[in-house]
Each structure stands twice: as C-alpha cells, then as structure tokens.
Image (cartoon, rainbow, N blue to C red):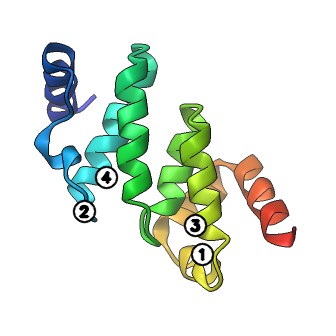
Amino acid sequence: MEPKVFKAMLHFVYTDALPQELEQDGDDGDGVEMARGLLAAAHRYKLERLKQMCEEALCRRIDVGTVAATLVAAEEHRCQALKAACLEFMARPGCMKAVMETRGFEEMKATCLPLLVELLVKQLT
C-alpha cells in the first residue's frame, strides 16, 4: 500500500470522511488512483463504508482513459455497482472503440479474460 493511501485510510478511520481530493468531483488522475488504492485497502481490511464511498467516487470519475482499469478493480474487489457502471459506460455508442485504444484495455486483455467475455456479451445483447 502506498503511504498516501495508508494516510488516507487512517484519515477515514478517524474522521469517517474521504480525503478532500476524493470528496470533489473531477477527472484528475490522482483522485482516480487514490480511490482505487483506497478501494483495495477497504476491501482488504473489510471497511465496508470506505469501500462504498470509494466505489461512488470512482463511478463519478469514469471516462475513456480510466474505465478499463476501474473495471478490473471492480471485479477484483467485488464491487457490483461500479462494475455495472463501467460496463454501461463502455456500451455507449462509440466508447468501446476509444476504450480499446487505451493502455488500461491492453492490461485488462492480458489479465482478465472473464471480463472481456462479459463485455463482449454485453455488447452483443
């Protein structure tokens, strides 16, 4: 766990609040990375409220550049609402082609074959 993620987790434990950078909506890459790191920590340490808050923060930050990695994180940490939001975003007209050109999609292809199958089924139905 990165030190900044650990610090943010401690902040949550003592204040029951997300760090300021996650409270605000936005498409900054640091916020997405922080939310994914906190999601992993929350899943690992069974902090369900933090997990839900990170899931909501990531849902607000879905875009072409982040959706594939966020989908993988949703699958790894059993976040069904986040997974559904990612699949819905990717199913939008024109989005899938753009997502397929990202580095995150390449990484998803290499590590998460079941997600690709689910994504294809969603695209075909």
Q: Quick one: SS at disc 4?
A: helix
Cβ atoms under marks 1 and 3 closer than 8 Å: no
Q: Quadrant of residue 89?
A: bottom right
What is the x, y in percent for residue 60?
Answer: 38, 56
Residue found 54% across the figure and 46% down from its top: 82
What label sits on residue 123 in the rendered view?
A: none
The residue at which mark 3 appears reads as 89
Q: Indicate left or right for 6 with 114 as reference.
A: left
Q: CA distance from mark 4 to mark 2?
A: 9 Å
Q: Residues within 10 Å of mark 1 (few under 14, many from 20)?
A: some
Q: CA distance from mark 1 to mark 3?
A: 13 Å
Q: Residues within 10 Å of mark 2 (few under 14, many from 20)?
A: some
Labels 1, 2: front one: 2
The residue at which mark 2 appears reads as 26
- The amino acid on which the numbered mark 3 sits, given as a three-letter code, is Phe
Q: CA distance from mark 1 to mark 2?
A: 23 Å
Labels 1, 3: front one: 3
Please tell me which of labels 4 and 2 falls first in the chain.
Answer: 2
Residue found 55% across the figure and 82% down from its top: 98
Q: Nearer the viewer, residue 52 or 111?
A: 52
Question: Quadrant where the N terminus lies?
Answer: top left
- The amino acid on which the numbered mark 2 sits, given as a three-letter code, is Gly
Residue found 33% across the figure and 37% down from its top: 37
- The amino acid on which the numbered mark 4 sits, given as a three-letter code, is Val
The residue at which mark 1 appears reads as 100
Please tell me which of labels 1 and 3 falls first in the chain.
Answer: 3
Question: Is residue 33 in sight in this rendering?
Answer: yes
